[in-house]
Image: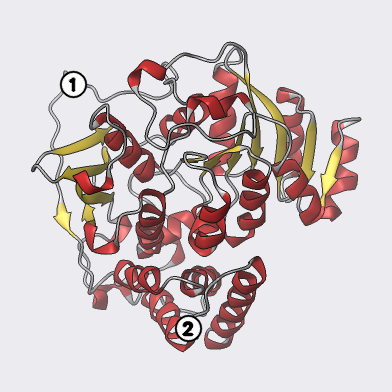
Amino acid sequence: MQTPLADPADLAGAAGSAGPAGLAGPAELPGPAEPRSIVVLGSTGSVGTQALDVIDRDPARFRVAALVAGGGQVDLLARQVERFRPEVVAVADERAVPALREAIGSVPILAGPEGVAEAAAWPCDIVLNGITGAVGLTSTLAALGAGRVLALANKESLIIGGPLVKRLARPGQILPVDSEHSALAQCLWAAGPSGYDPEAVRRLVVTASGGPFRGRKRAELTEVTPEQALKHPTWDMGTVITLNSATLVNKGLEVIEASLLFDIPFDRIVVVVHPQSVIHSMVEFVDGSTIAQASPPDMRLPISLTLGWPARVPDAAKAVDWTKAHTWTFEPLDEEAFPAVALARHVGSEGGTAPAVYNAANEVCVDAFLAGRLPFPGIVDTIAAVVGEHAVSPAGSVGEVLDADAWARARARELTAG
C-alpha cells in the first residue's frame, strides 16, 4: 500500500528501509536540524516558482540542490541560479545550453532527457517534481529509484505510470503536492493516532471550483474561446492546468491520483463543486464524521507541507480570517455538461495503459483547442473517442506506457487535424 505522507526517517536523504507504513503522528513533528536540500524540477513553471518562493522565505530551513527546467525561459532560469546557487542545473532542451552557459558561468549544466533524469536522482532530501505532463514520468521514476522522497505535483506521472510508480515507491515515499491530495492526506493524518486505515474511510470527497463555466449547460459551451477558458476564478496556474480545470479533465486526473495514492476504489471517491476553493477536500469516515481541510487558495501551503514534512512551515500562506463572515457552498457535479470525471473513472477502473491514453489525448486536444481546431466540448469528446479505440495493455514497463502515450497522441492528432 502506498501511504500518502513520508516517514520522518526518510527525510534525511537516506535510501534505506522505509519506516512505519502509517501516517507520521503528532509526536514526530520536529523541524529540520539543518537546511533541507531540495531539487526543483520544473523550476520556471507555476509550481516551481512558488516552491522557490517558499524556499526563499526560509533559508534556514531549505536550500536548493538542483534546478531543472525545459529550457524555454533561459533568463528566468539564470535569475533563479543567481539567487539560489544550486549545485547543478539541468535543461531538457539541449539548444538552451549555450545561452544558459553564458548567463550562469561555471555552474555545471546537464542537458537532454538523460541530464534531467540525472538531476532528478541528485543527492538531496526531497525532489519536487513540478514538471507538467507525461514527460515527468522518467523524472518521477529516477527520483524514486534513487531513494529520494518525492514531492509530487506532476500527477500525470503517477496516473500514466501507476503500476510502475507504485511498485518502485517505498511506503510513504511520495508526498502529494496537489492541494486536494494534500488536504486528503492531512484529513487522514488528523483522523487518529492509529495511522491510515482505509477500512475506516467511507468516502474521499474531492472538491472542485467548477472552473470558469460552472453552471453552464453543454449547449452553452460550444462557443467558448481560449481566452475565456484560461480565466480561472480562484487559482493562478499554468496554461495546461488552467484549461484542464475548465474542462474538469484535471479533476478526473485527480480522482485517479487519489485512488492510487490512498488505495480507495473509485466508487468511494466523489467530486463536489465548491466555488470558493477554501475547502480543498474532505474525508468522510464510516462513523458518519467528516474531516475537512480549509485554507485560502494558495499553492504555497501544500508545497511547504511537502518540503517541511513532518513539520509545518510557519506563515507559508494566509489562514482563513475567522473574524469575518464567510459563505461556502457545495454543489453536485453536472456530469452531462462536464463528462471528463466520469470518463476518468472509467479509464481508472480499466487501469493498465488506459489512463496514459486519457492523459495523452487530452494534451493533444488542449493544443488543438488553443489553436482553434477544436471546440471546447470537443476536447473531452475526442478524448473519449481515442479511449474507446484503445486496446488496453497491462502497463508493465515504461515502454508499454510510452507506446500507449505515443499511439494516443497520434490518433488524437488525426482526429483534430481539420
Point 14% across, 32% down: residue: 326
- Residues at marks 2 and 1 touching, judged by CB atoms closer than 8 Å: no
Question: Of label 2 and label 1, which has the lower sequence position?
Answer: 1
Residue at label 1? Answer: 322
Q: Residue 323, how many percent across, how many down?
A: 16, 18
Q: Is residue 372 above or below residue 45?
A: below
Q: Is residue 164 visible?
A: yes
Check disc 1: other Cα within 10 Å, few if <14, some if 14-19, many if 20+.
few
Q: Amino acid at mark 1?
A: Trp
Check disc 2: other Cα within 10 Å, few if <14, some if 14-19, many if 20+.
many
User: Which of label 2 and label 1 is nearer to you?
Assistant: 2
Q: Residue 75, how many percent across, how many down?
A: 75, 39
- Front-most of 327 and 190? 190
Q: Residue 46, how many percent across, how many down?
A: 54, 43
Q: Residue 254, how many percent across, how many down?
A: 38, 55
Give SS at disc 2: helix
Give SS at disc 1: loop
- Front-most of 203 and 59? 203
Q: Is residue 271 above or below residue 300?
A: below
Position of the C terminus, as image quadrant, is bottom right
Point 42% across, 16% down: residue: 314
**Residue 68 appears in which quarter of the rendering?**
top right
- Front-most of 308 and 265? 265
For marks 2 and 1, give the CA distance.
48 Å
- Residue 216, which numbered label? none
Q: Amino acid at mark 2?
A: Val
Q: How is the image coloured?
A: secondary structure
Residue at label 2? Answer: 386
Q: Is residue 199 left or right of residue 123?
A: left
Q: Is residue 76 visible?
A: no
Q: Is residue 300 left or right of residue 191?
A: right
